[in-house]
Image (cartoon, rainbow, N blue to C red):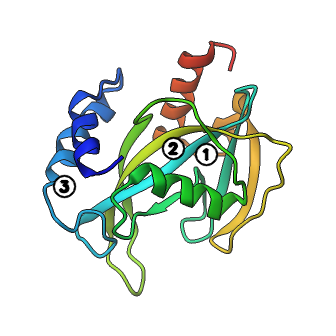
Amino acid sequence: MNRATLIESLRRYTTPFAEEQAFIKPFLELLQQSRAYHRDHLPGHITGSAWIIDTSGQRVLLTHHAKLNRWLQPGGHADGDENILQVALREAEEETGLTHFDNLVEGIFDIDIHTIPARTDFPQHLHYDIRFLLQADTEDELMMSDESHDLAWFDSSRLADYVQGNASIMRMHEKVKSLFGADQ
């Protein structure tokens, strides 16, 4: 999914979530900037992430992000790579150790714009995150990266207990429920 394909996908993207619908215009504006895929582009830049569910659709794989101290889906910076699906897959592999994923939805699964707090070496900024729905086998061995404190599969029914009210995570959970059945 290169820049042109992403722009076209965003123009066609529909969602029943008003907060997500509001993200489309800022994404399209950002993508007019030549360095939108570079982490030094401020006030924000494109990132890619993966919402990874198991083969039953009952569990989701999250990483406890070391810098943000929160349970999140695997993902990260594009670092100039305009194939954002490739970025999401690379980040999923690096942060989980898994190497086999099935892409369950053609194109974009979710979009989000969220604030990343300032660090001593970088100011507060925005991540314009493109998310993809992937599936992996819970029997495959996980390998946590040094970017995380922990890595675990969570039962979807207890997800809210771990994500501290993170609306975008709960939105992705709701989308999986609507795609794969209400009991997910």
Q: Which residue is mark 1?
A: 163
Residue 15: image location, x then y, percent: 34, 24
Q: Which residue is mark 3?
A: 30
**Tag 2: residue type?**
Asn
Residue 21: image location, x then y, percent: 27, 31
Return the disc, 3 or 2, that comes first in the chain's sequence: 3
Quarter location, residue 159:
top right
Q: Could you tell me which quadrant the C terminus lies in?
A: top right
Quarter location, residue 131:
top left
Q: Give the residue displayed 56% in from the left and 30% down from the top.
A: 104
Return the disc, 1 or 3, that comes first in the chain's sequence: 3
Distance of label 1 from label 3 (alpha carbons):
28 Å
Q: Secondary structure at mark 2?
A: loop
**Tag 3: residue type?**
Leu
Comparing 136 with 66, the one in front is 136
Quarter location, residue 142:
bottom right
Distance of label 2 from label 1 (alpha carbons):
6 Å
How many numbered badges does the structure rendering display?
Answer: 3
Q: Which residue is mark 2?
A: 166
Residue 178: image location, x then y, percent: 54, 16
Mark 3 burial class by Cα count in 10 Å: few <14, some 14-19, many 20+: some
Compared with 181, 158 (above or below) is below
Q: Secondary structure at mark 3?
A: helix
Closer to the camera: disc 1 or disc 3?
Answer: 3
Q: Give the residue displayed 73% in from the left and 27% down from the top.
A: 58
Pointer 2 and pointer 1: residues touching (CB < 8 Å)? yes
**Tag 1: residue type?**
Val
Comparing 124 with 54, the one in front is 54
Q: Give the residue displayed 28% in from the left and 35% down from the top.
A: 9
